[in-house]
Amino acid sequence: ELCQTYRKSMNFEGSFEELAYNRNLANKTPDGYVFKNAAILLFAQDPERYIPNARVRYVRYSGTERQSGKNFNAVKDEFFYGAIPTLIKKLESFMEAVLRDYYYFDVQSGRFHMVPEFPKDAWLEGIVNALYHRSYNLQGNPVMITHFDDRLEIENSGPLPAQVTVENIAREKFTRNVRVARALNELGYVRELREGVPRIYESMRDSMLATPEYSDDGTTVTLTLRNRVTDHKKTIPDHILKQIEKGWDDFSDSQQKIIGLLFENAELTIDGFIEKMSLSESAIRNNLKLLEEQNLITRKSEKQRDRNALYHFSAE
């Protein structure tokens, strides 16, 4: 099916074998056509029969670090097989199902907006890039997608080409497997050759998330995307969200600032508020008390007077 799709996308009248030869994806011998590794990766039903580790592994960990032994915290571990276009489709559907949404608070409007854990352009481009930039040698490992509470790591066998570093990767254009990249472009899976990495940076920036991080240890290149889900250590009940939205215009500027800070930081002490607000301690305490009386926030401390008391949104 992929072979015929490629023929149609190229408006090629001859056989797939002839097209592969014309696109430098096969050699012509007296005994017939011999497909190159690029063609196997792109069109074979089971590329791993010919190229070891031509697959993708996804692991989801509960928390922000890998644990082992009795604290082992992997909650999902799945492998994906097939030609690269097939892998892209499978992984696109799978990742859309496992990635979460969370609420982003717009302090200008007092509205909560549901946004994805990571922008799709960032994680999908990261996966596609890993598939066609990885080193498909005998020692190569599968493409790894490691999912933590606070980040997504996408690893492929490296290293980076000589002219590319983790510092200039957003500017330096490169393609390790040119034939694979070109065919993916012709099939519509890569919109613009060599524009994937800049798009990752752009989509993270547009979503107001941390700058993508690349690392290269000489054998593996890792892309790390960080989210803001763990900024909110506790789930804020729906009725609290609705109460804040409904009454936003009735809150004072100081109360709006307090609500915004709690949404950004999950919980703060009185000193935390003082550091972030241009108000006196007594004014901050008065505003906190008013919000407590509305059951919007809760003070967490067993002591009557405690500078280390934590304020957070009410759980009930």
Image: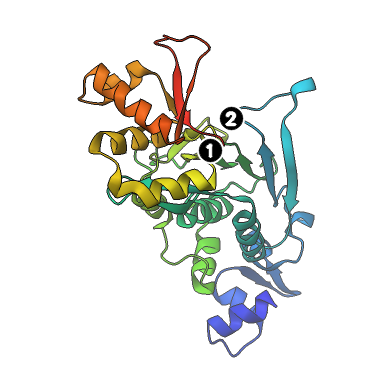
Vertically, is 194 above or below 78? below
Crowd around label 2: few <14 · some 14–19 · many ≥20 (10 Å): few
Report the residue at 27% width, 48% height from top. 108
Q: Nearer the viewer, residue 189 or 96?
A: 96
Report the residue at 60% width, 36% height from top. 148
Residue occupying the far bottom of the picture? 13
Q: Position of residue 217 (x, y in %)?
A: 53, 30
Q: Nearer the viewer, residue 236 or 72?
A: 236
Q: Position of residue 123 (x, y in %)?
A: 51, 51
- The mark nearer the N terminus, 2 or 1, is 2
Q: Quadrant of the N terminus?
A: bottom right
Q: Would residue 158 be seen by someone viewing this image from the given angle?
A: no
Q: Which residue is mark 1?
A: 151
Vertically, is 174 above or below 61? below
Vertically, is 88 above or below 266? below
Q: Position of residue 124 (x, y in %)?
A: 52, 56
Report the residue at 61% width, 54% height from top. 95
Q: Nearer the viewer, residue 13 or 268?
A: 268
Q: Which residue is mark 2?
A: 64
The kind of residue tagged 1 is: Arg
Circle on res. 216 = none
Report the residue at 76% width, 74% height from top. 31
Q: Position of residue 138 (x, y in %)?
A: 70, 43
Rendering quarter of residue 137: top right
The kind of residue tagged 2 is: Thr
Left or right of 41, for residue 119: left
The local secondary structure at tag 2 comes to loop
Disc tally is: 2
Q: Nearer the viewer, residue 30 or 162?
A: 162
Q: Quadrant of the C terminus?
A: top right
